Amino acid sequence: MASQVDHLVLFLVGVTVFFSLLIFGAIGWFAIRYRRRSPGERPQQIHGSILLELTWTIIPFLLTMVMFGWGAKVFVAAHSPPDDAMEIFVIGKQWMWKIQHPEGRREINTLHVPLGRAVKLTLTSQDVIHDFSIPAFRIKQDVVPGMYTTEWFIPTRIGEYHLFCDQYCGAKHAEMAGTVIVTTEADYQRWLAGDLTAVPPAVAGKKLFELYGCNTCHGQYGPTLAGLYGTQVEVIDERGIRRTVIADEAYLRESILYPNVKLVAGYPNRMPSFKSTLSEEQLLDLVQYIKSLSGAAATAPYKGPPLGPATQPGGAEPRIENPPFANYRTNQ
Amino acid sequence: MSDLVAHQFDDLEQQTEADTLGMWTFLATEVLFFGGMICGYCVYRLLYFPAWHEGSLIVDNFRWLGVSSGAWNTAVLLTSSLTVAMGVRAAKMGDNQFLAKMLVLTLLLGIAFLAIKAAEYTHEYHEGVVPGYSLFHPDEEISGDLRQAAANSQIAENTLRHEFQLFWVFYFFMTGVHALHMVIGVGLFTYLLIEARRGRFTPKKHAPVEIMGLYWHFVDLVWIFLLPLLYLVR
Amino acid sequence: MSEEKHKIESVGIYLLIYFLLLALLIATVSAARLDMGPWNVVTALVIAVAKSLLVILFFMHVRHNSRLTWVFAGAAFVWLTLLLGLTLSEYRFRPPAALAHSVAQLERTSDR
Amino acid sequence: MATISYIPEYAAPETYLNTRHTVASWLLTKDHKRIAILFMVSITVLFAVGGTAAVIMRLQLLTPHSTLVEAETYNKLFTLHGIVMVFFFLVPSIPATLGNFLVPLMIGARDLAFPRINLLSWYLYITGASLTITCLILGGADTGWTFYTPYSSSFSNTHVVLAITGVFIAGFSSILTGLNFIVTIHKMRCPGMTWFRLPLFIWSMYATSIIFVLATPVLAITLALVCLERILGVGIFDPNLGGDPILFQHLFWFYSHPAVYIMILPGLGVISELVTCYSRKAPFGYSFIAMASLAIAILGFLVWAHHMFIAGISIYGGIVFSILSFMVAIPSAIKVFNWTATLYKGSIQLDTPMLYALGFIGLFTIGGLTGLFLATLGIDMHVHDTYFVIAHFHYIMVGGAVMAYMGGLHFWWPKITGKLYPEWWGRIAALILFFGFNLTFFPQFLLGYLGMPRRYYAYAPEFQVYNVMSTAGASILAVGYLLPLGYLLWSLRWGRTAGPNPFKAAGLEWTTASPPPPDNFEETPVAGEPYNYHEMDFSDV
């Protein structure tokens, strides 16, 4: 990715240098060649030339279209992570980056990644807009509260690289920086194993799954989640139209937050929304858990604490009693 | 040069044309001014349909004789537009007396509009839907509706309440700015009335009436769009 | 331009326009009571545009005005369309998770 | 054209300056020329405020972890610098001073169409500026001039409402100026002044006014919503309370991108006047330059989301706005080529205004071409929000708009004051500014490419060398700005008296006395062909 961006930059630098030299050269040459030689001098008037105007309209236009096409190609590539990319979750908050590896290791302001593997970052923010930028990899993406954004890269050289917050986010914006550490696969595995207390997100997600009693429905009279991730699901979408979607992270997140936007075909619209219940971290954990599910896990009999009315079969909407401004101004 | 014409103009016609064009330019600004609000309104309507639905149900629910106050107010404004148009016509013919009558009617209608709006605001205040830290506490009935809507649309109730409040932000902001324009209009028309009483307008010199008439019609126009957006569409 | 500009409309036309406007008002209020699904929005907005055209063309005399006035009045609405059109289209193309629970409910709520 | 060759001095003719002397005659004046002077004084004060903030920031950035100011102070400084420079200097700079002074003179009118509204516009500006200064005194705001939500609406605990109110009010000042210009240009042209005889400066002012009128109200409403959100605690743009922060960015940039053209279009107009005068030639491709101004104004409205490529908008949105952004580059390119072609076979005199003009063309070219980097999706995702962006828009705003303002100020100084400034000092200052500018901002392109983010009060040590260069350049730049302030003020008292047309320039403003009489012209002029350098008499130079 970085080299693609650099080639593109090189092309634009070429164009810039060419036209700057052309203009500076022409101005300099004209200023000397046609300097006023006598105070009363009166030059010949030239009022214009359609041919020239067309030339310097069409050539820049074509050049910019090349820039556009090339730039769009690189941009789209930078937004299309490969399927086998390892996924790391990043949560921005004033003023630190909380990073979560799929195996459970969590780190702050440091991102360990193995050499040569595609890495997909899923980003969200807990408070204001941040921006996760790794200049050496030529990528950045705003990290917006209430939304998942992604970026991906393949580290190609061992070393340590800067990681910056690029979107102004308050007093310590400049300190919301860190390091990306690219190591060999072996070193990465060793590092992953280093923290014995780490709870993998999938495990934490399992606890949540049980806590909220998801398994009372899912796999029984709700659609099963086992082996769901990555498959095609037939859903009834927002306009009541039946269509197929891929069950990816965005779909899972959306279905937890807004269950009926893409209702699995053939199932009743029973599931409550968890929008105000789950934190972004918990959502990530749940998504990770669902991704990890084997057939047995989803249908395991329920052994958790007693369930609230919300998730009783046929139960009503859960009453989530957060006062309206619970999150407000307290998380500064 | 007569003192009817400001020193920068050559003649009355140039002055009238400049004044009129100035008003049209100002109205173009106003279109975008309201346009910003309408844009925000539309985006959130797209995003938060259920909350918007509940909101407009309640707005439309304040009725007299089975017709919502929004519709009554539209009728009032349309009538005032007629009286303004008739007034401008009178001014063009130099008929200051008829003009004065029309201006009085217009003023009364304008004040009637504001009165209806005030009654509406009071009602909404008692329902507790005025947005803000401490103001916003919808009464039991509305809260019940919201719970129902939340259950039906599978949105957490808390979230729906936020979005519902957002509807009211836009409602009060849009109608409030519109009402502010009405208040300014009433002021301008009072000035016109005084001038008309003094017999200041002639077939040649009636630009102020025409220009302020344009303003009044524009304020009417804004309401013509606010009615469906806030009251009717759901 | 000036002769046309000072043209005085007859009272009859004003009254006619006024009653047309009232009729449209009644139409839009009654149409809102019918359940036409997405067509409710369309009807309401079409009637609003019709009403505003009547006001602009007759009450505001744009019908008799110079082309300049047409351009100014038109420009404002063109710009408004740019603002609304580009912004809303960008939203419609957002990844679904960003569009939230949104549009979605339209169908279900109007079923109710 | 009615050519008045030279009016011999007779007992102090009445001018707009000497007609009355009381303070009230200035503060209540309806004369566009006096209002222009009021604006000129006010924006100079505000420029000094914004410039001081910039100098402190540059000093802070001299070392990677300087302790000159704290993080919070630094954030308030760049916010102040942005708000003051954008809303209180660049936006009103050329339109409200040179524009106010020249629009009626250039089209042969006695005044703007609405003199009272013009004065109101100044009072609104002063009210807005006072609020912003009050905000500064109370401790400032720290949101950046972009007021991004939800930071500005829910998280910042500085005086955001005050700053926003200041900008809000100043916005109405712009709207009224734009409205006045549009009506004046449409309705107040003197006999013979057809649309295609308008000076190119007037074309650019017209284009600018369109943006004033159609974009500013959207900013006003957006800022009002942010205020409402802060005061009422409702979530208009805060996702924690149900709002969408990206909607704010849409509405904000719907104004603020066209606002970039508010700042540069008047500059483009000034340069067209300077280049023609100092090469004694009619502009090459008059109608192309004029239409390019309009095209920039209109296309400029369609590109706003290129500030949001990485903000979380759809890829579709990115692609549409990227291609539209490239479109707006074309008319700018047309202008640059036409100015250069105007020089060809001219009679070029490198006086102070011409030095600014040629400097402008070069810097605007670099600024414009680096803008293409940012419109290119694949590069923007690397350099967005870094010093590359800072360098790019300072090339346009300082290298472009401020250079044009300085050039125009020198060029019309004799017309405004009736005095000539010392030419030698003028040239020295122009060269110092050009050099200082490039030293300040060119290194920032490299910084940005290396990844240094904007709005950082401390940075990684490897960025230091370019920051030192930049700070050195900034100090040269500061001297460059102080020099003209000195010698222009000096010239008011001791400068040589200028005739009506000291530079032998074409245009109606040069046919009346310097400074002009209160009603601009002794009698209403009749316009001929513009830029009639082929029939002007240069024998008495």
Image (cartoon, rainbow, N blue to C red):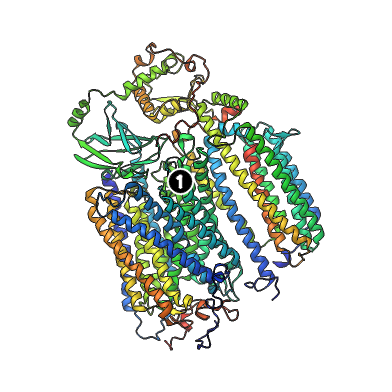
> Where is mark 1, residue-wise?
D249
| Quadrant assignment for the C terminus of chain D | bottom left
For the residue pair A224 and D518, the one nearer the viewer reads as D518
User: Does residue B76 appear in this view?
Assistant: yes
Residue D199 as seen in the image, left or right of residue A3 = right
Choose top left, top right, bottom left or bottom right for residue B190: bottom right
Question: Residue A9, percent across and down?
Answer: 30, 52
For the residue pair A35 and B176, the one nearer the viewer reads as B176
Question: Residue B122, percent across and down?
Answer: 66, 37
Marks counted in the figure total 1
When the figure is inspected, residue D265 is found, relative to residue D137, above or below; the finding is: below
Image point 47% across, 49% down: which residue? D252
Choose top left, top right, bottom left or bottom right for residue A283: top left
Image point 46% across, 36% down: which residue? D239
When the figure is inspected, residue A284 is found, relative to residue D300, above or below; the finding is: above
Residue A237 as seen in the image, left or right of residue D77 = right
Image point 27% across, 35% down: which residue? A118
| Quadrant assignment for the N terminus of chain D | bottom right
Secondary element type, mark 1: helix
Residue B158 as seen in the image, left or right of residue D362 = right
Categorize mark 1 by other alpha carbons within 10 Å: few (<14), some (14-19), many (20+): many
For the residue pair C62 and B231, the one nearer the viewer reads as B231
